[in-house]
């Protein structure tokens, strides 16, 4: 599985961005896809996750209500719509794919994911 993330950039606080993650290679029709982020000097943290079936959608508490994860199965692409961005959202955002259909409680951990994209930088100015 190859993952290609895109859509990052520079945006002012309060603005919006939409990240995309295109998956290629063998696909796992019911396995989760996730977004994580890593700010400078901080650990990688969970942002959101979704199953290709759409049956499970998870958000980190600090992103719920501002971020929306979605997927287009026909395009093998997962999206992260980010609204009301804050300077503290500045980070490199990574998409990831699991190879097991983990229970929802596991999907907030980076160890549940086997494949990772290269990351896309989001910078939010104040």
Image (cartoon, rainbow, N blue to C red):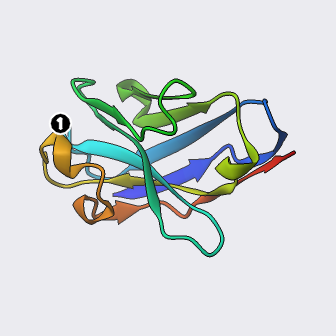
Count the marks.
1
- Above or below — where is 98 with respect to 20? below
Horizontally, is 37 left or right of 40 in the view? left
Q: Image quadrant for the N terminus?
A: bottom left
Residue 57: image x %, image y %? 31, 29
Kindly give the residue lying farthest to the bottom in the view shown.
41
Residue underneath mark 1: 30
**Residue drawn at (83%, 41%), measured in percent from left and top?**
11
> Based on the displayed image, in which of its 4 quarters is residue 103 positioned?
top left
SS under mark 1: loop
**Residue drawn at (70%, 54%), measured in percent from left and top?**
90
**Residue drawn at (23%, 26%), measured in percent from left and top?**
53
Q: Nearer the viewer, residue 103 or 88?
A: 88
> Based on the displayed image, in which of its 4 quarters is residue 61 positioned?
top left
Horizontally, is 95 left or right of 8 in the view? left
Residue 78: image x %, image y %? 45, 36
Residue 6: image x %, image y %? 63, 48
């Amino acid at each position: 599985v190859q993952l290609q993330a895109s859509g990052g950039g520079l945006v002012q606080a309060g603005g919006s961005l939409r990240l995309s993650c295109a998956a290629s290679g063998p696909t796992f029709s019911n396995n989760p896809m996730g977004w994580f982020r890593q700010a400078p000097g901080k650990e990688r943290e969970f942002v959101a996750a979704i199953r290709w079936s759409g049956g499970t959608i998870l958000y980190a508490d600090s992103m719920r209500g501002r971020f929306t994860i979605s997927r287009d199965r026909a395009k093998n692409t997962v999206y992260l719509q980010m609204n009301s961005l804050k300077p503290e959202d500045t980070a490199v955002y990574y998409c990831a794919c699991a190879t097991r259909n983990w229970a929802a409680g596991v999907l907030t951990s980076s160890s549940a994911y086997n494949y990772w994209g290269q990351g896309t930088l989001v910078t939010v100015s104040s």
